[in-house]
Image: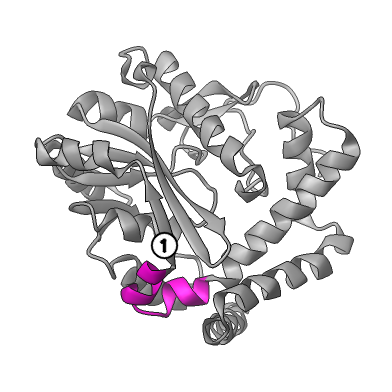
Amino acid sequence: MKNIQLVLIKGLLQFSALLPLSWARGLGRLMAKLYWPFGARSRKVTEINLALAFPDMPQTEQRKLAKASIAATAELFTEMGHIWLKPWSHVQSLILETHGTDPVLAALAGGRGVILLAPHMGNWEVVGLHAATLGSVVSLYQPPKIEGLGPIIEQARQASGATLVPTDSRGLAKLLRSVKNGGLSGILPDQVPADLSSGENSLFIGVPCFTGTLASNMIRRTGALAVFVYAKRVPGGFEVRYELAEDDIYDKDTAVSLAAMNRGVEQCIRSCVEQYQWEYKRFRVRPRIGKGVYDKM
């Protein structure tokens, strides 16, 4: 089954890479329209998440936003042919604007490490590639479940100079050492960790959910500058934005730091709500308090 999936995914990637970017994105939107009527898992999770995040939004608007989110996720997939299969020079030509790099460059020039907090929004593959042009980047990498995609993703993510390390103790040690030595590291601040000891429940858009403590701990241990970053999808390419985290993210109290981190993710989302990956089960709590929000699926 995985071999069939691999063939289909590779075929779609190769086909979409041949199309102009606007056509590739159009293909994604078409796929989303065909997917929507089936009411499958991604649609259900999206609708639950939007109802939790925007309880005062009329249902008609929630439905419209849900459709836009599914379409944006489909665009993410169909534009990957351009990101994963084409050379860095091509991807670089798609980055039409960048904002907020000066504080990052100043920190690196002064020998201070930088931790980039990249939420699940826009095209985070573009984020990693652009960040490596600013300084030495070390990022955690977990191979995909479909093994044949691993070499494609690894080569693509290292195309502009990044170094990938495994998500184990040795990889984390290399990551920490790199930041302490004045390098860059990218972390997903809104990824729900599987290990109970790796996070705490904290409010995100007013809803309690399990939030990873890796970024908070690393910021505290290294004295690194914390910066949010995302690649917003715009006509013809991408706009990469770097935004400084608020001061509370450096607080020694983990609860205060996590709350600030979640507020930072919220701030990023406001710039392009539909491009956040609402299909992800973000509002899980651990340990569970009563019935989980996704149990009714």
The structure residue drawn at horizontal position 47% and vertical position 29%, both measured from the top left corner, is 264
The structure residue drawn at horizontal position 40% and vertical position 80%, both measured from the top left corner, is 86
Residue 31 at what x, y percent from top left? 75, 71
Horizontal placement of 56 versus 177: left or right? Answer: right
The structure residue drawn at horizontal position 20% and vertical position 26%, both measured from the top left corner, is 223
Horizontal placement of 288 versus 215: left or right? Answer: right
In front of the other: 154 or 64: 64
Horizontal placement of 17 versus 270: left or right? Answer: left
In front of the other: 101 or 219: 101
Residue 166 in view, yes or no: no
Residue 129 at what x, y percent from top left? 34, 61
Q: Which quarter shows the C terminus?
A: top right
Q: Which residues are magenta?
A: 80-93
Which is the main secondary structure of the residues drawn in magenta? helix
Against 42, residue 212 (above or below) is above
Q: Which quarter shows the N terminus?
A: bottom right
In front of the other: 279 or 173: 279
Q: Quadrant of residue 185?
A: top left
Residue 241 at what x, y percent from top left? 42, 45
* Residue at the spot of label 1: 95
